[in-house]
Image (cartoon, grey):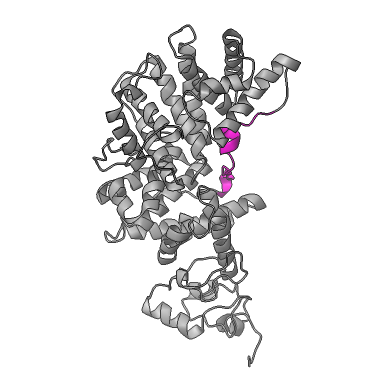
Amino acid sequence: MRRTLRRSCAACAKAKHKCDLHTPRCSRCTLRKVQCVYANEPLSSPGPSKSNTALRESSGVPPSNLSTVSVTIGSSSFDPFDSYPPTSLPRSRVQSLIVHFLSKIAFQYYPLDLNPNSNPFINSWWPLALADPALFNVSLQTASLDAELHAQKGFHQSAILMRDAVSLIRHKIDDPTLAFQDATLDAVVTLAAIEHGKGNLHECRMHVDAVKRMVAVRGGIAAVKRSSPLTARMVPWVSMLVTGSPQFEVQDDYGNGDGIAPIDQWQSALAFETHNPDHLGSSGSGLDHSIETILARLRSIFNLTQDLETRKDLNTNDLHDLTCFVLHKLLLPSHIQLTAISECVRYALAIYMFVIHGPTYYSHAAILHQITLVLQNRLQELEQSQDMDVSLFLWCLSVGLSASTGTEEHDWFFNRAATSTHSLGIETHDSVEFYLRNIFTLDVRSETMFRGAWGPIFASTLRGPTNEQPTTALNMLLNDEEYEYAAENNTHSGV
C-alpha cells in the first residue's frame, strides 16, 4: 500500500519547490546534478520501477526494444515499460507523440501501404528509432510539428526535439562506427525535409550534402538498399523533392553501377524489346532514342493488354522503385541535346510518374509545379510545328492541363486544349481517351484526373464558362500537408 500520494520527486518536495515531473529526472534535479527519486510515478500511466531506472542510468544500458511489447495503436497506455530512448519532454507527451507517429505520420509518409502490419515506417523505421535516440527524437519531432501545426499555439516542443536531435546526430557523426548507420541517414534526410518545410533552404542543403557523403562512404544507394530498403528509397526521393532535382545516379538498364536500380519489370520490358524490335518507334517521329525507350518500357509495364510472358503486376514497393528510377533517369542532367518533342515527352512523363505514384515521405507539389512550367515552355516551342504525333501531343497536353489547375499557367493549357478539340473535331471526352490510350492504358487514378481536367472544356462549349473545379494532379497530390512554420519558432539544425 502506498504511504503517500505525492507525485513530486523527493528533492523538490523537501525543498518545497514545484516539480515539473519530468522523467527519469526532473529539470531541477538535472540542473543541480542530484539524484531524482519519485515516491510514486509522476504521471497517470504506468512507468518503470525506480530500481530499474537507476540501474539503466548507471550502467548505460540502452532502452529495451518496444517491438517486443504488444502494442495497440491508439492505446492511452502505449508503452508501460518506458522502453524508448529518453527525451526532454514529459513522459505523457512522449507517449502521445508515439501514438501520433504510428497512427498518422507513418501512413502520411507512406500512403502506398495503409496496412499497419506491413507499412515500412511501422515495421522497419520504428524498430530503428527505438534503438537510436537521434532517430527517435527526429521521429517524435515529425509528429510534434504536425500536432502543433494544427493546434496553432507555436512550436515549442518541436524546437526542443530539434535541439536534442541535432545534438545527438552530431555525436553520432563524430563516431565513425555510428556515423554511417541506416538510422543516421534516416535522421539526417528527415531533418532536410523538416528544414525545407520551414523555409530554411541553407540548412536543408547542408543535410542533403551530408547524407550524400554518407551514402558515398557506404558504397552507393545499391549498397544501402541491401541493409535497409526503406532508407535506400527515402534518401534519394526526399533529396530530390527538397532540392528540386535528382541528387543520386542510377544504374544502367542491366543493373550495373551503385546507383538507383531498375526493377525486374523494367528489365523484363528490355528483354521484350530485344525480341520485338518493332515495339520501338511507335510514337511517331521526333523522339530521341533515350526518351523513346523509356516511353516504350513504361508502356510495356503499365499496359495490361501487352503480351509479356515475363510481365509481373506492380506492388506498391515496385511502383515506388520504378517511379524513383524513372524520375532520376528523366531529370538527371544530360549532355545529349534532345529534340523539342523529346523534351515535351520527358517532362510530361515525369509529371505522369508523380501523379500515378502519389505523395510519399514529403509533398512533391513544388517540384511538380516546377516541371509543369518547363512542360508549358516546351509545348509553346512546338505550337507552330505539325510534326508531333497527335496522340502524344494530346497526352502531353492532358498531363499539363491537369497538373496546372490552380496556377497561373492553367489558362494557357486550357486555351490550347480547347483549340485542339476544335481543330481535331473532338467533341467528347471518349474521343480524347481514344488518343490517350494510344500512349498508356488509363487506370482509375489517371482516368479520373484526365476526365476532370477535360470536363470543363467540353462543358464550356455547351453552356459557357463553368466555375467547377476539376480533379487535378495538384489536388490529388496535395493530400499530405505542406508544413509552413512561424519564422520565430524556427530552430536551425545544421549538422
Q: Is residue 163 visible?
A: no
Quarter of the image with the N terminus in it: bottom right
Percent across and percent down for residue 406 are 62, 28
Q: Give the main secondary structure of the magenta stretch.
A: loop
Q: What residue do we see at 47% from left, 45% from top?
A: 193
Q: Is residue 383 visible?
A: yes
Q: Is residue 9 magenta?
A: no
- In the image, is 148 to the left or to the right of 380? right
The relative height of residue 198 versus residue 391 in the rendered view (above or below) is: below
Q: What residue do we see at 32% from left, 24% from top?
A: 290
Percent across and percent down for residue 427 are 64, 15
Q: Nearer the viewer, residue 42 or 261?
A: 261
Q: Is residue 484 magenta?
A: yes
Q: Which range is magenta?
A: 469-489
Q: What residue do we see at 67% from left, 18% from top?
A: 458
Percent across and percent down for residue 140 are 52, 59
Percent across and percent down for residue 18 are 63, 75
Q: Nearer the viewer, residue 298 or 146?
A: 298
